[in-house]
Every structure is written in structure tokens, then in C-alpha cells.
Image: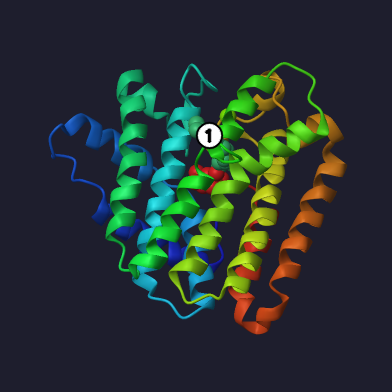
Amino acid sequence: MKLPPFLEEDRIEVDQALDRLLPPEATMPATIHRAMRYSVMAGGKRIRPALCVETAGLFESDRRAAIEVGCALEFIHTYSLIHDDLPALDNDDLRRGKPTCHKQFGEAMAILAGDGLLTLAFVTLSKAPIPAERLVRVIREISTGAGTVNGMVGGQVADVEAEGKPVDAATLEYIHRSKTAALIRASATAGALAGSASEDDIARIRRFGEKIGWAFQVVDDILDVEESSAALGKTAGKDQKQQKATYPALYGLEKSHETADRLCAEAMAELAPYRARAERIRELAQFLTARRA
Ligand code: FPP
Ligand code: MG
């Protein structure tokens, strides 16, 4: 998928940093380092790092620090994809256009590669060049977003438990806000925290991240219906097959599109005080809701 030029620049810089931060393939035990590298370097839009870096850019910040925090977010995101694809969860063979980690390395190694990436994220954060007091807040923001209470793991639990059952609006909203929006919200907020954002700014960016992350998962649901596996780099049409709790399933495609647009507009409204300075983040938010993969 083609990214807008500044996102492509961010992606290239993030990819270089990911390569630097991942243990080399030959490091003992080599198998897990091969598996971790395989999944992280398989491609991916690097949306979460971009949100972190671009948000940090709104406030006085050290770009290198924001890139490293972005890499930690990408390690967590990639671990979640590896585990999500396991036979016990979504049981998928294709991710980022390649065989899934467990297809390539076996289930045991895929579980461990996910564990390794989650752990590496926090090693990476502990070394980021950010003043200690701010860094602790970055770590709290990200660990909470990835956790069980209204965070990614909690959302995944609700997603698994909703499979094959009729889902109500409140449960569907909980799944989307936790499973996906929480880490995206943490990505934007961590960027603000890595820079010199005020408490008001931090709260505003958190609301922006929440809305755009929520819209992102609604769009993800829509793409699963509207796009091909080749375009998505993962198996399309799976949500319906697995009777997943999705926006199109509960509301239909038209209403789902409307919801994504409304959430995106609400996110954009939070950026109003930053005027022209937020142009790149606006473009990023636009891209997240208009994307086709
Ligand atoms: C695609 O991201 C991923 C999502 C829309 C998030 C779905 C949520 C999970 C898989 C959570 C799983 C949680 C656990 C604990 C297993 P993307 O379009 O940014 O993918 P890319 O990085 O490949 O571009
Ligand atoms: Mg899933």
C-alpha cells in the first residue's frame, strides 16, 4: 500500500531503528531472534510509531527519542499480531503478505517470539533518551494501553468471548476501544509525553488518539468485507466466517462508513487549537480512515 510521502519517510526511519534495536539473527538462541525479526520486518505501515513521532513533533521534542518509543509500540503491536494469528485465537496463515509466524517457525516459537517482543518493548523504553519523570509516564501510558483493564489484552478477551454470539452495541464498542484504540491512543499520548506537552495538551491528544484508534478498527472491519486478501496481506472475509463482533455485522456497511467518518471528524476537532502545526497529524488521521489496506 502506498503511504503519503511524510509517512513513508517516517516508515523508513522507523524501519532502520527497528533493525538496530532487534537482536541480530545470530544472537543465541538464534531461532527466536529469527522469528522476532521475521514478523517485525515483514512490513507493516508503522502507523503507531508514526502517530508517536508526529505527535511528539507538535511539541518541542527529541525526534530520536520519539522514534525509539515508536519502535517499542511497534514491538508490542507485532507481538499482538503474532499471538492473534495463533491457532488458539484467530488461526490465520497469512500476515503482512507472508506466512504467519507460527506457520514459519511453529507454534511454540511464535508464542515465545511474541513474549520476546513484548519484553523487548520495555527494554527499549527503559533506554529512550527522555527525562526520567516523563519516561515513567510514557511507560505507564503504553503498558496500560496494552493491558487487561480497558486495554488491548482486555479487548482481545472480549473479542474471543463474543465470537459466534449476537453482540450488543456496548460490547462492540468496548471491544474496539480496548483491542485497538487503546494502543493507538497510547501511541499518540506517548508522543505528547515524550515532548514538552502541557497537561491540557496531553489530555487533548489522548482524546484525539482514542477517537482515531476507534475509527481505525471500524475501518479495519469494513476492509475485511470490502477488500481482497491480496490487498490486505491477510485473509479477507474472515470476520463473517468466524462470526466476529464487527461494525458491519451489527450496523451494515453504510452505517459503519458513517461511524468511521464521524469518529475521524471528532478526532480532528481536538486538533483545532494547533492550527497549521497539526497539518501532518491531520493528514495521518485522514489516511488512517481512508486507507484501503
Ligand atoms: C492491524 O493493524 C491490526 C489491528 C487493526 C488491531 C487488531 C487487534 C489485535 C490483533 C489485538 C490482539 C491482541 C492480543 C493480545 C493477541 P495495522 O493495519 O496497523 O497492521 P500493519 O502493522 O501490518 O500495517
Ligand atoms: Mg483477532
- Left-right relation of 53 to 202: left
Identify residue for label 1.
Answer: 153
In the rendered image, residue 157, in percent from the top left (x then y), is placed at 58, 27
Mark 1 neighbour class, 10 Å CA radius: few under 14, some 14 to 19, many 20 or more: many
What is the count of numbered marks?
1
Query: Quick check: can you spot residue 118?
Result: yes
Query: Quick check: can you spot residue 232?
Result: no
In the rendered image, residue 137, in percent from the top left (x then y), is placed at 45, 60
Answer above or below: position of 84 versus 45.
above
Q: Tell me the residue at 45%/46% (across/down).
A: 143
**Would the CB of label 1 be found within 8 Å of ligand 1?**
yes
- Left-right relation of 58 to 247: left
Give the color scheme: rainbow, by chain, secondary structure or one colour.
rainbow
Answer above or below: position of 179 versus 212.
above
Pick the front one: 65 or 290: 65
Q: Residue furthest front?
A: 133
Pick the front one: 177 or 99: 177
In the rendered image, residue 136, in percent from the top left (x then y), is placed at 39, 59
Q: Residue furthest bottom?
A: 276
Instruction: Please state which amino acid type lies under the numbered disc 1.
Output: Val
Q: Tell me the residue at 72%/76% (across/down).
A: 272
